[in-house]
Image (tube, helix red, strand yellow):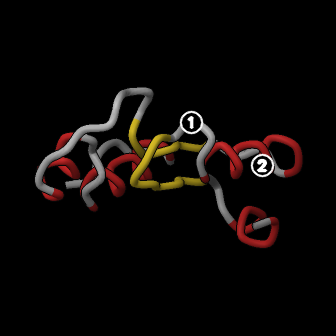
Amino acid sequence: LADLAAKAKAAVTIEEHSVIGGLGEAVASFLGENLPRPMKKIGIMDTFGESGQAQELLDKFGLRARNIVNAAVQLLGKGQAR
C-alpha cells in the first residue's frame, strides 16, 4: 500500500458493504499515519441493509463504474466524468 500511495495523488476505495469498519477505513488509517492523501470511500453508508435485485442495489448505493469514475475525477479536482 505504501508503494502505491507514494505514486498516487489520491485514493478511492470501493466496497459492497458498509464503509464503517471496512477496507476504506483501514486504508484511510494507514494513509493518515504514513502518507496523507485525499481519499474517497465508496460503499454502503451508515444504513440498514436491504434486499433486492443486485443491479438495482448497485444503482441505489452508487456502486456502478460511472459512480466510481466520477468520485475519482471529483477527488482530483477535475469536475465530473461523462
Residue 32 is marked as none
Q: Residue furthest bottom?
A: 3
Left or right of 10, for residue 30: right
Q: Residue at x 56, y 36 (%)?
A: 20
- Residues 81 and 30: in front is 30
Q: Which residue is mark 1?
A: 20
| Contact flag, marks 1 and 2 (Cβ < 8 Å) | no
At horizontal 24% and vertical 38% (from top left) the residue drawn is 50
Viewer-closest of 78 and 48: 48
Residue 42 at what x, y percent from top left?
44, 46
Estimate the x, y position of residue 33 in percent, counting from the top left: 87, 43
Label 2 packing within 10 angstroms: few (<14), some (14-19), many (20+): some
Residue holding disc 2: 31
17 over 55 or under it: above or below: above
Query: Could you tell me which quadrant the C terminus lies in?
Result: bottom left
Nearer to us in this view, 48 or 65: 48
Q: Tell me residue 17's x, y (percent).
A: 43, 48
Which corner quadrant holds the N terminus? bottom right
Q: Quadrant of residue 44?
A: top left
Quarter of the figure with residue 11: bottom right
What type is the residue that disc 1 sits on?
Ile
Please state the horizontal and vertical placement of residue 36, each as a whole percent of the image. Answer: 78, 44
- Element on which disc 1 rests: loop
Q: Residue at x 37, y 27 (%)?
A: 47
Say above or below: 19 vs 64: above
- The amino acid type found where label 2 is placed reads Leu
Q: How many marks?
A: 2
Q: Earlier in the sequence, mark 1 or mark 2?
A: 1
**Relative horizontal placement of residue 31, taking residue 39 as reference (left or right):** right
Q: Does 53 appear above or below 6? A: above
Q: Residue at x 64, y 55 (%)?
A: 9
